[in-house]
Image (cartoon, helix red, strand yellow):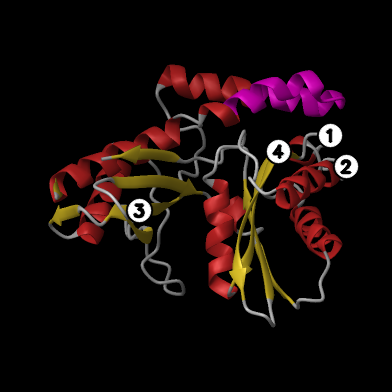
Amino acid sequence: MKVIKEADIIKLVRDMCIEANKFLPSDLEEIINKSPNVETNPMGKAILCDICRNLNAARELNIPICQDTGMAVIFAEIGNEVFIDGDFEAAVNKGVSLGYTEGLLRCSVVSDPLERVNTNDNTPAIIHVKLTKGDKLKLTVAPKGFGSENMSAVKMFTPSATEDDIVDFVVDTVIKAGSNPCPPIVLGVGIGGDFEYAAILAKKALCRDVSERNKKERYRLMEERILKKVNETDIGPQGFGGITTALAVNIEEYPTHIAGLPVAVNVGCHVTRHITKVM
């Protein structure tokens, strides 16, 4: 049995919140750095170069990549041989609180969706827990800005829906979003489960490396097809036109009910941030 102390979780989450907001995953940054070389629209190419300079400036000045440092989303995989000495949820929220206040990150969470009073420490976080085998605690911190989150969508298809219908729904979601999610974007698509789990799948898909394709050929081909069609919309970087509307499309699937086919699209901006650590 591996014992993990509450204080260690607090410190790790604190540090991860800060790091995730200052440094993009290397695979995503690599695609962004290459994108000006393939963009054909002069304005789009210039904007992509600005984005590259912004990433470098954030690193050099040790400041966040974007002013919207997001709502903290935490995915936790807890091994069955792990004993957490303390309150796990309280530890995560304390870590988020310290990360955002001590890291001087913008606090964007309000305590009630209608009363709109800021909590001033970006808590509570959105926490998803999965129990697994082993003696490891795996944490993924994914700060999610709402310029892109607001452009996301869920549709409850019936089983008669075709792959074309799903592809068209994803592309239509991007078209309706236009410049709002600060393209070039990353698309997380969840297919299956039920109403809420499709959305969780889509959020998890955004936490997958953009260099990693779905292991099933059918979904891998759908990822490639959606990416191609999205980049033919001419929305382009920041909505000024071009062939770089999306950087990647990640699909995650799950079994579903015989009468349903839920599909969720979680839109991520060009700073689709996430970081994973294992204790």
Q: Amino acid at mark 2?
A: Glu
Camera-nearest label, 3 or 4 = 3
Marking on residue 267: none
Question: Is residue 199 rendered magenta in the image?
Answer: no
Q: In the image, is 5 to the left or to the right of 151?
A: left
- Residue bearing the label numbered 2: 232
Pointer 2 or 4: first along the chain: 4
Is any part of residue 182 visible from this angle?
A: no
Are the residues at dot 3 and dot 4 in contact (C-beta closer than 8 Å)? no
- Residue bearing the label numbered 3: 76
Task: Give the extent of the magenta segment.
Answer: 29-50
Q: In the image, is 149 to the left or to the right of 38?
A: left
Is any part of residue 159 visible from this angle?
A: yes
Are the residues at dot 4 and dot 1 in contact (C-beta closer than 8 Å)? no
- Residue bearing the label numbered 4: 184
Dominant secondary-structure state across the stretch colored magenta:
helix
Q: Amino acid at mark 4?
A: Pro
Instruction: Write down the quadrant of residue 50 in the picture.
Output: top right
Distance CA(mark 3)–CA(mark 4): 28 Å
Tell me the residue at 61%/73% (across/down): 256
Q: SS class of the residue under badge 4?
A: loop
**Image spot of residue 233 (x, y percent):** 87, 45
- Residue bearing the label numbered 1: 243
Q: SS class of the residue under badge 3?
A: strand
